Amino acid sequence: MKKLNIFRYAALFPLGLCISSPLLAQEDPAPMPVERSVFDGDYLTAGIGIAVGPSYEGSDNYTISPLPVVLGSLGGIDFQPRGPGIAFDVIPDRKGAKVDFVFGPVVRARFDRQNSIKDPVVSSLGKLDFAIEVGPFAGIQVNRVLNPYDSLTAQVDLRWDVAGAHDGMVIFPNMTYFTPLSRSVVTSLAISGEYVDDNYADYYFSISPAGSAASGLPVFTATSGWKNVGLTTLTAVDLDGDVTNGGWGLIFLGSYSRLLGDPKRSPVTSIRGSASQFFGAIGVGYTF
């Protein structure tokens, strides 16, 4: 069955991802019977949205940006956004299964403090290089938890920077509950966190003596630990009232995350920004 995989407020940004859901393939003759759907076999969802989020992680300044999304399935391999990036689930779904497994490669780009730095003090620290994080992700999905069409998915990413930016490692566990509210409306709630190593923490949250002299901020050394925890909610609405036949749909996404440990204590957050980080997006997608 097609899975809902919505993770990472930094993730996580799936126009149409909700439409790719257990509602479409589970075999249960109850309130919303499904014989065939656009999601049986290969399909593609393409969309565009508008997102509002912090100008960099730890900032209290917000920017507006476009949000293009492409996701789908080809030959039994699902591909999905991984904000910004992409993940491939290479384990084919089993129709009618109570439990499904998720596994595959993931690639994610990270542009923190690479552009759009509104704070002049933080800007004086200099721009950072963009990172490309690559690694595997794996998880398990339990279907029909509270009703014939819902699911609970737990998975984790393990990613390393291969672009020579932070040169560190990120562990990204997350858990998502998905359920339809009607034939045309589906929703999900996800909780996630990120654990980072010394290299990552030092690159984004430390302030060197030279940086202190340039910005006036105190010297600070950040080390490994839990960087943040977050909560994301997503609702998708099919515009013709039936998610199974594809077509046009709207999506509404909101998330809140809280920086922890040294990322929270870093002067770029504690003095110039905020540990509370909000993200919102609205978009439209087409599935065929």
Image: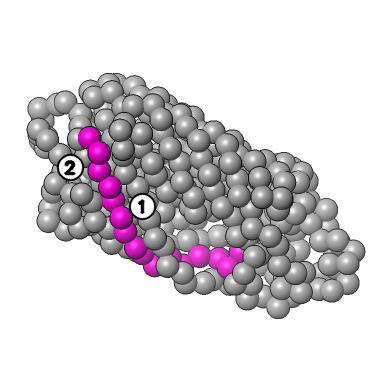
Q: Looking at the image, is 267 positioned above or below residue 6? A: below
Q: What stretch of residues is rendered in magenta?
A: 41-56
For residue 58, side relative to residue 179 (left or right):
right
Q: Which residue is mark 1?
A: 70
Q: How many marks?
A: 2
Residue at 81 percent across and 61 percent down: it is 207
Which percent across, then down, holds residue 196? Answer: 68, 43
N-term mark: 2 or 1 = 2
Q: Is residue 146 visible?
A: no
Query: Which colour assignment does the render follow?
Result: one colour
Q: Is residue 72 visible?
A: yes
Which percent across, then down, holds residue 133? Answer: 60, 45
From the viewer's side, name the closer residue of 268 and 123.
Answer: 123
Based on the picture, tell me whether residue 72 belongs to the magenta stretch: no
Q: Amino acid at mark 2?
A: Val
Residue at 46 percent across and 46 percent down: it is 86
Q: Looking at the image, is 245 positioned above or below residue 25? A: below
Instruction: Determine crowd level at label 1: few under 14, some 14-19, many 20+ residues with C-alpha closer than 10 A.
Output: many
For numbered disc 1, what is the local secondary structure?
Answer: strand
For residue 203, side relative to residue 153 (left or right):
right
For residue 48, side relative to residue 124 (left or right):
left
Which percent across, then down, holds residue 146? Answer: 27, 30
Q: Which residue is mark 2?
A: 38
Q: Are marks 2 and 1 in contact (CB under 8 Å)?
A: no
From the viewer's side, name the closer residue of 82 and 163.
Answer: 163
Please identify the residue farthest to the front as the structure is shown. 75
Q: Which mark is residue 288?
A: none
Q: Amino acid at mark 1?
A: Val
Q: Quadrant of residue 37?
A: top left
From the viewer's side, name the closer residue of 265 and 242.
Answer: 242
